[in-house]
Image (cartoon, grey):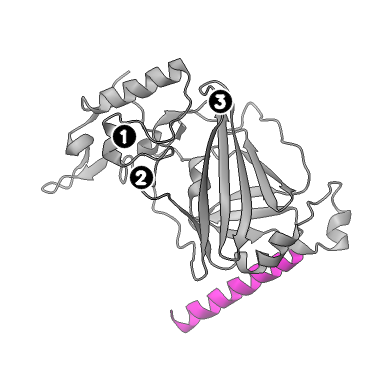
Amino acid sequence: MNISGARTAAKLKAVLLSIAVLALAPSAGALAQSDRALEAVPEAFAEVLPQWVEGTWGFVHPEGCFRFYWGCYGSQEDYNAGIEPKNPFPLTEEARAFHEEVIANLNEGRSIFDPNALCYPSGMPDIARSNFKLAPGPTGDRWYLVLNGNEFRTIWLDGREMPDVEPYDYTFYGDSVGHFEGDTLVIETRNMVGENTAISPNTPKSDNFWVIERWTPVSADEFTAEITFMDEERFTEPFTETYQVRRNAGGETGRPSDPCITGVGQRYIPDPETGEQLLTGPGGMALEFAEE
């Protein structure tokens, strides 16, 4: 790192540390400006928060599980072949039938549902497992999770009720409201709306979808995350997974991600001779998007 970069990093670290201190002890003026009661930060978080704002956080995918999909598929090939994961989604009969239709079409060379390949945002719950930098707000009423250098989630900690979704809202991240239960931060997220959104791998979700995350500190470098999500229209019961999240003390969120080009980085692979982006499936089989 050059001198300029080192100075910039040092300034950023100082700002984040000062934000963390303010978050733990918000000023009287800030409290007077709000009619909501700020969540009291429990000792387990207060002890580690000054370290938590340094570096970045990333989830540790369980051994033997394909990291990009929920449910613990052994590999992309297992999913393509229709092999059930260790922890399958509790789908309704209708949702299960669509899931099987997606798999059957993939094996016949057609892609009928793949929002990520069409550049729709991943949104929640997939974004819950993205690397992030923690940045508590200066008055203690919110925490920011900074993603990819130019995206962020806001976790409100001011005792507010979950807002109602407006007819014109179109948000893939939803609204997140948190509170502490003992030494665990509980984050509820609702109001994830918008067409063509999916839970990896390629499972549609309705507007009646919600997520509960539970973060419990293990140390200054690790916490346990339990995530439960439920689709009132497509699931028969809530789905839960637990995983570890670990800190990279020297990590940075990096520059903003490249603009999305439809399909690149998902199922599109460049032809080695022409460079043309070709839609591919199991075993490199050529695919096509099915027409309505």
Is residue 147 in the magenta section? Answer: no
Residue 237: numbered disc: 3
Residue 258: % across, % down: 39, 53
Q: Is residue 32 left or right of residue 111?
A: right
Work out which residue is located at the far bottom of the displayed protein and give it.
Answer: 3
Q: Of the residues shown, which amino acid type is indicated by label 3?
A: Glu
Q: Are the two marked residues, 3 and 2, in contact with CB atoms closer than 8 angstroms?
A: no
| Residue 289 in sight from this viewpoint | no
Q: In the displayed orientation, state which residue is furthest to the left.
A: 273
Q: Which residue is mark 2?
A: 66
* Quarter in which the N terminus is drawn: bottom left
Magenta span: helix, strand or loop, mainly? helix
Q: Which residue is mark 1?
A: 79
Q: Determine whether 94 is above or below 168 in the image.
A: above
Determine whether the residue tagged by mark 1 lies in a helix, strand or loop: helix
Q: Secondary structure at mark 3?
A: loop
Quadrant of the drawing holding the C terminus = top left
Do the residues bearing badges 2 and 1 touch, measured as CB atoms within 8 Å?
yes
Crowding at label 3, few (<14), some or many (≥20) Cα neighbours within 10 Å?
some
* Residue at x 56%, y 34% (from the top left corner): 229
Q: Quadrant of residue 135?
A: bottom right
The residue segment tinted magenta is 1-22
